[in-house]
Image (cartoon, grey):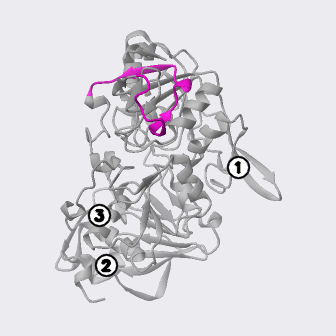
Amino acid sequence: MRVISSQQAADLLEDGMTVAASGFGGCCHPEAITAAVEERFLATGKPRKLTLLFAASTGDRQTRGMGHFGYEGLVARVIAGGWRGTPRLGRLAIEEKIEAHCWPQGVIAQLYRAIAAGQPGVITHIGLGSFMDPLHGGGRMNATTPRALVERVSLRGKEWLLYPSMPLDCVLLRGTTADEDGNVTLEDEAFPLDVLAMAQAGRNSGGVVIVQVKRIAERGSLPPGDVRIPAALVDYVVVCENPAQHGVSFAETDNIAYTGRVRMAVSRLHPAPLSADKIIQRRAFLELAPLHRPTINLGIGIAAGIGRIASEEGFDDYTVTIESGVIGGVPAEELSFGAAVNPTAIVPQASQFDFYDGGGLDIAFLGMAEVDRHGAVNVSRFNNSIVGVGGFTNISQTAGRVVYLGAFSAGGAEIAVADGRLDIIRDGRVCKIVDHVDQISSSPAFAPEGQSQLVVTERAVFRVIEGCLMLTEFAPGIDLASHVLDRLPKGVAVSDQLKQMDARLFSTHAMKDFAP
């Protein structure tokens, strides 16, 4: 193992390399190294025509993270689960300047193990019937992408998808401490993700493995059980002493409650103010409260706030999981999403998805961009932007129950909550309940048998029944006809037991203070 600077690390990338990098949202990304790659390219025009592989959306939705690679010429192809955090790369894809593929986050996390083991790829049911199915585009996100890499295969009388392995020429990882031999621990990281499998994949591909850390420790001083990346897998270490490039997330320099060093008093978490988003989260929470000790998943964005709602209501009879590998605690939000305050366990990301893919989740709460009259959901591409699926497809196609959360309309909506009623001051220009979604990120047709599906907005609640979206609830204070019914596409059913949403949702008081 050799200690080098971030600039020297950037110099190791050569034209045409396939590069994999760790990261989840704003966490666990080797920011100093990828920033140095950007600096080198802007100064010299090198390297060129890289292929990028990364599982989760890794960036700050502006320029950091994998966004450092977002230049024409620097990148030729991107294969990613999440694109939301890297708008520069998304713009290159929209402008047809790179090949762009979107695969499920869990599949890419599992793919690193397949690459390390010399296997042909990941064979799975995840993605069948979605835009990642070769029958519907094979995960291609633009016209420049010449062919699908994903294949349909038949095994034991069933159809599966094969997401192929590929050699990794360079792997960029992040840890906390490296000893003088190159053994790496992750004591200050919010979670380990798949750093071991990625390092093994890089080594067995004949590639170079570079790890960004905070510090160097004496040889033999790290407890063996704490070492997550053995020295035999590490070629180079970059020491980053800049907290802005090695914080626990892009939002926080450190948070010891994420790593388990200290347990925060959750009573100190301030209740969220009453808003349209909080109404959505509260209504979704009502699907959780009656269940007996369920294992759940909370997606990014509005869905992540359900953990805070549960805390406000004093409800803790459940086990929360996050795609990052975090189990238990109160999920963080925004650029710290993936971490949790007071987690009870943290496992590798691929292991978390093993559990999800096998049907381990009792209920999942996921965001949505648009839903069609058949219950198909799009979260991946809309409004001329590429967001990707992240773990959405893994989870929505396997959980026992799914609750989709999102605003009823988009584009200029102004909504207030007052006196137990919803006040739509100005409605959004576009209804998110549509005739057909632009891109099928998940479809009820490929959900497990008996899966319950609910769509929750601030003014209306829908259930998916036998492949048809049905309106079942509406908010007090709205004009049902003009604010809901007139905006729905033909084919959306209306329940003959249509009722108003629970009045407790629209109060400033905790819902537990009300009689049921």
Residue type highlighted by circle 3: Arg
Q: Which mark is residue 475?
A: 2
Residue hosting label 3 = 308
Q: Quadrant of residue 178?
A: top left
Range of the magenta residues?
219-242
Q: Dot 1, crowdedness within 10 Å: few (<14), some or many (≥20)?
A: many
Q: Amino acid at mark 1?
A: Leu
Residue 125 falls in which quadrant of the image? bottom right
Left or right: 357, with 328 as reference point: right
Q: Earlier in the sequence, mark 2 or mark 1?
A: 1
| Count of marks overlaid on the render | 3
Q: Residue at x 59, y 61 (%)?
A: 397
Q: Secondary structure at mark 2?
A: loop
Mark 3 near mark 1, Cβ–Cβ under 8 Å? no
Q: Is residue 215 magenta?
A: no
Residue 213 on image: x %, y %: 38, 27
Q: Position of residue 307 (x, y in %)?
A: 34, 63
Q: CA distance from mark 2 to mark 3?
A: 22 Å
Query: What's the CA distance linking mark 3 and mark 1?
Result: 37 Å
